[in-house]
Amino acid sequence: MAVPRSAPAAEHTHPAGAAGTVRGPRLEWYPRSIIAIECVGDLDPCGDLVQNNTQTPRRTTRKGNVLLFARNFFRHPRMLGSIVPSSRFLIRQLLQPINWARARVIVEYGPGVGGITAEVLRHMRQDATLIAIEMNPDFVRYLRGSFADRRLRVVEGSAESVDEILHRFGYTRANYIISGIPFSTIPAALRERILRKTCDVLEPGGAFLVYQFSTRVLEDLRRIFGYVARRFEPLNVLPAHLFICQAVTA
Ligand SMILES: C[S@@+](CC[C@H](N)C(=O)[O-])C[C@H]1O[C@@H](n2cnc3c(N)ncnc32)[C@H](O)[C@@H]1O
């Protein structure tokens, strides 16, 4: 199980020596811990958001996930960017910076068939909220039918609308935003809007946790957030670059 880390109180100067400080504690990746992922379930169509009564994801097979994901990859290769869902190694490393005791509002961009979603739900507080924003209607339907957890809201939409979506649920900011969307295949203007809005809605001390199959977005992340730490996960199809981004204030 991932161990919550206690966040240092002090602000940190940007490591590259740029002007400004990270708002709140600077985050790093921590040593790996063991996390099991396996959940998913049967279809149960519902409205725009999921608000069920239990806190445990229903179980189905990983094979079902992989097939649904692969089918959608052949339909929308640029939107998915990968033929199979993220590995447990990637998920484990991606979520390591999260201070679970502190996180009240978490947003996930592009949850796909919910591998990361399941792991976030397994760790997050009982009074926290996870807002999963997914553009693909097949995945939205699947996620809504697969998780029975009152803390999860599945929204069909684009990460570009993160500010409006947060407002809709009564929030203005998120502690963490996790992203698996393929920024390198997204048009530059849209990418810029998504990254700027993401930076704007992050709580001080919060972080934007990103994985990508190339480093093409790194320059944009550095320009917009100011502080970016990097990691690499070879045990994934494809091997993935991980970026932890925090806003630097002047
Ligand atoms: C590489 S897949 C990641 C799936 C999942 N997070 C995983 O780790 O297996 C990228 C996902 O992002 C979604 N996506 C792409 N662009 C998006 C956008 N602008 N807003 C929300 N979701 C988007 C795709 O539909 C797809 O489900």
Image: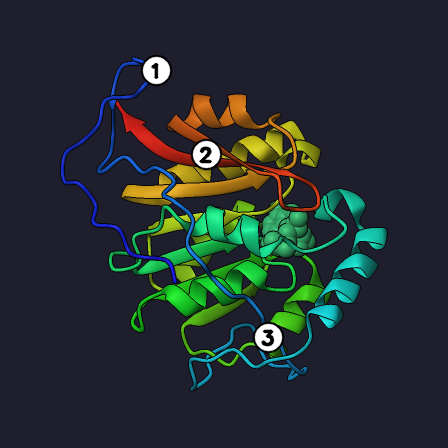
Q: CA distance from mark 2 to mark 1?
A: 21 Å
Q: Is residue 157 above or below residue 147?
A: above
Residue at the image position 68 percent from the left and 69 percent from the top: 62
Residue 220 lies, in percent from the top left, at: 52, 24
| Amino acid marked by disc 3 | Arg
At label 3, counting other C-alpha atoms closer than 10 Å, the crowd grade (few under 14, some 14-19, many 20 or more) is many
Instruction: Give the mark count.
Output: 3
Determine which residue is flagged by label 3.
144
Residue at the image position 51 percent from the left and 41 percent from the top: 210
Q: Is residue 7 left or right of residue 166?
A: left
Rendering quarter of residue 202: top left
SS for dot 1: loop
**Which of pointers 1 and 3 indicates the residue nearer the eye?**
1
Q: Is residue 127 left or right of residue 152?
A: left
Residue 8 lies, in percent from the top left, at: 17, 41
- Earlier-in-chain disc, 2 versus 3: 3
Determine which residue is flagged by label 1.
16
Q: Is residue 189 above or below residue 151?
A: above
Determine which residue is flagged by label 2.
196
**Which of pointers 2 and 1 indicates the residue nearer the eye?**
1
Q: Quadrant location of the N terminus?
A: bottom left
